Image: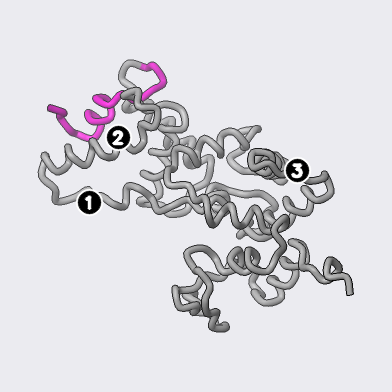
Amino acid sequence: MDSSQDRLDAASFLQMWQLFDSEGETIDCDPRGRRTDGGRGQWWRGVNTDVGLSSQLAAVMLPEEENFLLLFRRETPLDNSVEFMRIWRNYDADSSGFISAVELKGFLQDLLLQHGRSVCAEKLEVYTDSMMKMFDKNRDGRLDLNDLARILALKENFLLKFKMDGCSQEDRRRDFEKIFTHYDVSQTGALEGPEVDGFVKDMMELVKPSISGSDLDKFRKALLSHCDINRDGKIQKNELALCLGLKLS
C-alpha cells in the first residue's frame, strides 16, 4: 500500500477536528490534558498544552510539509507586542483593521520563503483556507488582532507584570524604566511606529482583553494627541513620563 495515499493533510485534519470540536473552536487543556473550558472531552496525555490542542494535534499528526506553520507557531512565539504590531501593520495592507484571506496568504507565503520553503499556488490556497478556518474564531472570513495573536503565539501582556496601584514614586519610576525599555526596541529614547502600537495594544488589553484594529487606531491617535508634546509623531521618554504623572530624576 502506498503510504502517501494514507497521509493526513491539513484540509483533512481540519475536517476531522471540526467533527471532534462541534463548536469549531480551539480546545484548550491543562498540563494534564484535561479541557479547561468546562466542556466534556477526552484526556489527552503527553500533549504539550501551552497552546491550543488543535495545533498540538496537527503538529503531531500531519507530515512535516503540512505542519510547518503550526510548528512555527509553537516553537517561535513572539515575546513582544512591538514585533507583533510590525507584522500586523505590514500585512493589513489596506489598513482595514483586519487581515483578509488575501493578506493572510501573503503572510504565509513570506513566512514559508523566509524559512526556505516554497509551495505551489494550490497548496498555498489550502494552507490559507485551513489556517483561516482554524483561527478565525467568529467565522467572519477575516482575522482580527486576537486571531493573529493566536496564530503567532504572542506571549502574555508585558504590562501584567506590574502593579499600577499602591506603589511608591520610586517603585513607579523603576517600573517605568523597565516598561519604556521593553517597548523602545530601537533604543532611540522615543516610541514610534510599531513601538507606539505595541504599547497601546498592551495598555488597552489591561482593561479590554479583546480589542479591534479600529479600537487600537483610535486610542493610538488619542495617546499621541495627549503625549506627543512636540508633535514629531513620536513619544519621547520624558513625554510619556509626564503623561503618567512621573518626574524622572
Image quarter (top left, top right, bottom left or bottom right) of the N terminus: bottom right
Q: Nearer the viewer, mark 2 or mark 1?
A: 2
Secondary structure at numbered mark 1: loop
Instruction: Say which of 245 and 234 sits in front.
Output: 234
Asked if the magenta segment contains residue 51, the reply would be: no
Residue that badge 2 annotates = 180
Q: Which span is picked out in magenta? A: 231-249
Closer to the chain start, of discs 2 and 1, is: 1
Count of numbered tags: 3
Q: Are marks 2 and 1 in contact (CB under 8 Å)?
A: no
Query: Where is mark 1, residue-wise?
Result: 163
Of 38 and 190, nearer the camera is: 190
Q: Is residue 103 visible?
A: no
Which residue lies at the image location 64% right of the left edge and 72% below the top edge? 23
User: x and y percent of residue 111 in the render?
Assistant: 64, 42
Q: Is residue 4 visible?
A: yes
Residue shown at 39% from the left, 32% from the top: 185
Q: Which residue is mark 3?
A: 118
Q: Quadrant of the C terminus?
A: top left
Q: Indicate the quadrant where residue 40 lies.
A: bottom right
Q: Name the spot of residue 142 as percent of width and height, x first.
A: 66, 49
Sequence-wise, the earlier of marks 1 and 3 is 3
Task: Report the residue at 68% width, 69% height from top.
Answer: 61
Question: Is 243 above or below relative to 70?
Answer: above
Picture disc at residue 214: none
- Dot 2 amino acid type: Phe
Q: Position of residue 153 (x, y in %)?
A: 51, 53
Q: Is residue 220 above or below residue 16?
A: above
Tell me the distance, in whole angstroms, between the alpha carbons under discs 2 and 1.
15 Å
